[in-house]
Amino acid sequence: MAKGSSTQDVRQYMSRSESIVKRGSPYAETGRAYVGLKSSGSGICAIEMRNGVPVSFISHCAVKEEDHGVKYLRQVTHTNLLGLKEVYLKDGVAFFLYDAWGITLDELQRLSHVFRLGEVEVATICKGILQGLEYIHNDLEICHGDLSCSTVLINDGGDVKIAGIGESMIRKSSLQAKFQDIRAVCNIAHTLLGHDNMTGVRGTLGLLAVDFIAAPPDVTVENLLQVHLGTSKASIITLKIRFLALVSSNCCTTLCTSG
């Protein structure tokens, strides 16, 4: 397809989806205030503030208008995905405005001396990731492409969220990339459980070690969701309570103070 035709398609798409995809930069919008971040390590480069309260978290990436994925940028709603609110396109850069952030699994790992995840909590987190991944693969029909402890977070309500869905829509998807997403969940489980605790374990920890870390290369999200992870509503509530206690005790530094 010629570049002109592709660009026209993108413009037509944006005219049909003005509520989320717009021309220009979010920083040029009047009546909106932003706080820039130096290096949060999470991909977030700025926070939109309103009356002293963070309302949007911004990341960006390079993009070409002829990129196939630009046409499919859209709002998504799923319990385990960080909501994408708006997208701006300007001079080869896409700006993604996301819902309220939280603390990433990578940051939680660095706080292990004050907040150590239990076996059931790790299983609960993995189940949340898999449910979000199932929606990405089957409903959106794309892959994530960058799943890691840095792109999975727990928000202030204790919910597991996969970040970066806007960037995922831009990337090219393939069957191999979907398998890599699933392998990434196995790696996350391995990291959260701890490399030194994998020998001679039983129960939930043993199930995760065998069914996640040693999963075959062609395993599917549905296969892993069929594994009894020992999760329950009670375990989810426990995870939320522990996380809220962590936040209220000021044990962690939020993105709002990293700028």
Image (cartoon, rainbow, N blue to C red):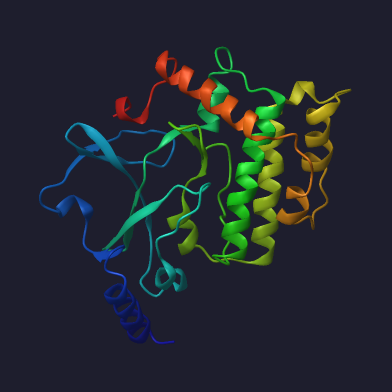
Tally of marks:
0
The outermost residue toward the right is: 200
Q: Quadrant of the C terminus?
A: top left
Q: Residue at x 61, y 61 (%)?
A: 137
Question: Can you say whether 41 is above or below 128 in the image?
Answer: above
Quadrant in the picture for residue 194: top right
Q: Residue at 51%, 42% (x, y): give it.
A: 161
Whole-percent x, y for residue 184 in the image: 66, 45
- In the picture provided, is 10 more to the left or to the right than 190? left
Q: Which residue appears farthest toward the front when viewing the image?
A: 233
Left or right: residue 104 compared with residue 121: left
Q: Is residue 223 above or below residue 110?
A: below
Q: Residue at the spot x=57%, y=37% of the render? A: 149
Q: Dividing the picture into quarters, in which one does residue 251 lie?
A: top left
Q: x, y percentage for residue 204?
A: 79, 30
**Could you tell me residue 128's position as x and y percent?**
61, 43
Residue at horizontal 53%, vertical 18%?
111
In the image, residue 187 above or below residue 27: above
